[in-house]
Amino acid sequence: MEIAILFGVFALLLVLGVPVAFSIAAATLATILYLDLPPIVVVQQLGSGFNKVSLLAIPLFIFAGELMLRGGISERLISLASSLVGHLRGGLGQVSVVASTLFGGVSGSALADVSAIGSTMIPQMEKRGFSKDYAVDVTVSAALVALLLPPSHNLILYSAIAGGGVSIADLFAAGIVPALLLALGIMIAAYVLARIRNYPTEAFPGFGAVGVRFIAAIPGLLLIFVIFGGIRAGIFTAIESAAVAVVYALLVTLLVYRGMGWGAFFGAVAHAARSSGAVLFVIGAAGAFGWLMAYLQIPSMAVEALQGVTDNKTLVLLMILAILLVLGTFMDLAPMIIICTPIFLPVARAFDVAPLHFGVILVLAAGIGLITPPVGSVLFVGSAIGRITIAEAMKSIWPFYLAAITVLLLVTFIPALSLTLPALWR
């Protein structure tokens, strides 16, 4: 009965349109009251949910991403991407994917990615004769690459929820090859759809222009190496890396690009504070939810249930993927990671799936929900930028779904794609 109340209240509130964090907290409180436990437990567990030192990296990386977003980095990355792949079929679509990949290595956020790249690329594609649905679909799909690249907030969150036994540096390394595969898959889908619709290409500007644009983008690109290289080399921790990223972003935007005034700076501070507060509240509420699931022994019940259905590792992984893809249609990424990690990580371990490998699977599978209605936040932002409805955006998104799910299956059943780089760089 307790489990029915926990998940029933949560599902009901989501259907009624209550924000996810409040739905999680209310479901937890309702179950606590039914169990006749002190209500103060909810507050205590909510506080302990985000009272983890490693989570301090998240607001710092959010702030660094905001600074780079408002300081001119996205324009230079788009310009570089245009010179590299603009001459391919559906050139601006390819530019959007490469630019999103480059910016993802700076922001670590799919929402920041689609906001920065989409606000520039979607209107440009429309002006050049690309349909609105194609412009939105390729941009929102490409934003998913940021979920797997350093400094991905979601990989940091998974590390914290997994109990701190999974290295953030190893997770960053594990996500690189899957991220590049995802970018390649989306580029292939964009190319095929562009050929079918006979979309135009851009003229190749010449190697001289490529060199000039690369040099202009170097200060921004170096942030990727500052973040990942510093952690991987053991020079600083993830939190110290995030602090260094903020300082570096300030120096680049103020002294090198000189693209940020006081108004933009205070806007970055305000937006980073709002985003961090929202993320941390979700983390806290989901932490209380996770504690209650552990109290009710739901993770061990999940292991027993799946083992009771089959002992075939492939079938178990396929069932987990199906559940994650369905949950992603109505849950945002952060609460999914916090709620699903304690349920499915023990299952993965029971079937000899490494926690490092499972982290990449979980983030990618849950991330696909960001471009899936009815709650796909990245799809909503992209559609708003392109000024089209969700229904219109869904007209041509299936090739990009196919690419993302294909990469998800490859990553799930070929562990070496995630585990080789961490093993090589230890």
Image (cartoon, grey):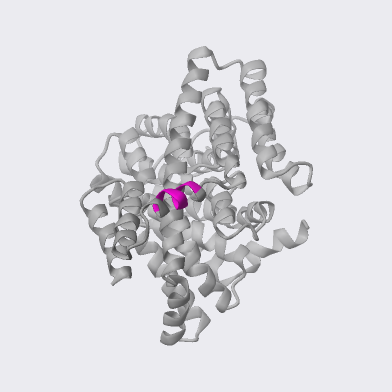
Q: Is residue 92 visible?
A: no
The picture places residue 327, in percent across and down from the top left corner, at: 36, 61
The picture places residue 422, in percent across and down from the top left corner, at: 71, 59
Which of the 4 image quarters holds residue 229?
Answer: top right
Q: Which residues are magenta?
A: 42-47
The picture places residue 138, in percent across and down from the top left corner, at: 42, 45
The secondary structure making up most of the magenta span is helix
The picture places residue 67, in percent across and down from the top left corner, at: 55, 26
| Location of residue 49 with respect to 247 vertically, above or below | below
Is residue 266 covered in magenta?
no
In the image, 174: left or right of 386?
right
Which of the 4 image quarters holds residue 388?
Answer: top left
Q: Residue at x 52, y 43 (%)?
A: 88
In the image, 172: left or right of 203?
right
Q: Residue furthest top?
A: 262
On the rendered image, what quadrant is the C terminus found in?
Answer: bottom right
Is residue 44 covered in magenta?
yes
Q: Residue at x 61, y 45 (%)?
A: 53
Q: Is residue 398 visible?
A: yes
